[in-house]
Image (spheres, helix red, strand yellow):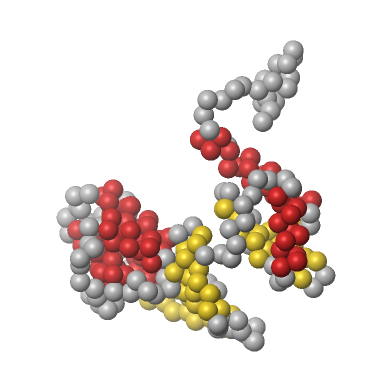
Amino acid sequence: MHQSLGFMGPKHPHHVCLWKKYLYGLKQSPRSWYTRFADYVSTIGFTHSRSDNSLFIYRHGSSLAYILLCVDDIILTAPSDALRQSIMTMLSSEFAMKDLEPLSYFLGIAVSRHSDGLFLSQRKYATEIIERAGMSSCKSTSTPVDTKPKLSVAAGTPYEDPTLYRSLAGALQYLTFTRPDITYVVQQVCLFMHDPRIEHMNALKHIIRYIQGTLDYGLHLYPSSTSTLVSYTNADWGGCPDTIWSTSGYCMFLGNNLVS
């Protein structure tokens, strides 16, 4: 920490205040931590990913290593134990770190290994959403959305607890990381977070009933011998009942893996 520019004490330019609040309670702390970490890993050969500033890439000959940073949680993957241990040693010399061994749980996502690859699941997180909605004993449904016409902004009467609606809709957004099957329907209920109606809440509950019966669903990651990129897209022309705008969507597969 250092004194702010323009407010440095002429007699004690290197003195700082003794805070009675943890560093994590300060709004600027995540940025300061990220800057420090990014500056250090750049000195040992890592570079930023062009698509994600939280992803750092290390190239050593034909070997590649990756670091994914989320606040103070770090995922490190490398093609060999020797390279991984070398990077861990360099990081440990600068930061207080603990090696938790092979990845098993990260930001609410459980990671399990099998002979063909990895399986990512948010079963525990999905169960918490169901409990938050008070629907632990609800009956499941086979589809995440009703086949009735699309919801309208002004449909029905306002829902009595919009805060709960927004909380559940936001929680479902994070669940889509490993559940691409509910991405579209979650996007639809999120359109009405500013003024949720009873019909909108019923649609949200329909999603939760679907999740109740599909808690074991997740995302499989398999190694693939092909680098072919296959894309699927579709559009519902003029499908929005309020604006008559079209709704479009797409998904892409690289080999056997869903990439977007």
On screen, 103 above or below 157? below
The residue most toward the left is: 157
Q: In x, y percent, where is residue 72?
A: 58, 49
On screen, 213 above or below 5? below
Q: Quadrant of residue 67?
A: bottom right
Q: Quadrant of residue 244?
A: bottom left
Quick check: 241 left or right of 65? Answer: left
Quick check: 53 left or right of 171? Answer: right
Camera sees residue 76: yes
Q: Image point 49% across, 57% down: which residue? A: 107
Q: Image point 65% across, 23% down: which residue? A: 16
On screen, 12 above or below 1? above
| In-front residue for pair 64/192 | 64
| In-front residue for pair 192/185 | 185
| In-front residue for pair 137/256 | 137
Camera sees residue 239: no
Q: In x, y percent, where is residue 223?
A: 60, 81
Q: Image point 73% across, 16% down: which residue? A: 12
Q: In x, y percent, where is residue 256?
A: 55, 83
Quick check: 111 left or right of 175? Answer: right
Q: In x, y percent, where is residue 166?
A: 32, 52
The residue most toward the top is: 11
Q: Image point 71% across, 56% down: which residue? A: 88
